[in-house]
Image (tube, rainbow, N blue to C red):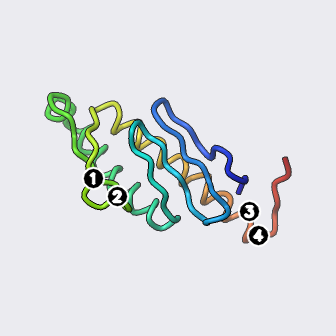
Amino acid sequence: MPNNETLYSSCYGTIRYCPHRCQFRLYFGDMQVAMETETLRQFARKVARLADKIERSPITYSAQPTQLCPPNLEGRTFSFCLDEILDLNDLLSGSLTLIELNEFLTENGFTIRS
């Protein structure tokens, strides 16, 4: 993984990897969260389920903001509109794809040089 470089970006956010703590840092609007790989995967699944519901019935979700409580921020909720939830889903799924690619390359003895 790159050292403290942007792993993936979307319209509203960025995910960076912090090698000193082996954590990913999610920056999305006012939300800033540090999490390990498994926590990131769990949060991505939660957001993907929500995004799927939104895509199936956008009229239901477009009228009011959706409240989301990210991991490692106990009790704090953030309010997102429809397009922000969909963008967060893209950000998380894109990041996980790159994480899984990096894990695959590492397990098979490949290295990426800049």
Residue 9: x and y in percent read: 56, 38
Q: Are marks 2 and 1 in contact (CB under 8 Å)?
A: yes
* Residue 76's disc number: 1
Q: Within the image, what quadrant is residue 82 found in?
A: top left
Residue at disc 3, secondary structure: helix
Mark 1 or 4: in front is: 1
Helix, strand or loop at label 2? It is: loop
Q: Which residue is label 3 attached to? A: 105
Residue identified by numbered label 2: 73
Residue that numbered label 4 is attached to: 108
Q: Residue at x 67, y 64 (%)?
A: 20
Q: Are marks 3 and 4 in contact (CB under 8 Å)?
A: yes
The residue drawn where x is 28% and y is 37% is 80
N-term-proximal mark, 1 vs 3: 1
Three-letter amino acid code at the position of disc 1: Arg
Of pointers 4 and 2, the one earlier in the residue sequence: 2
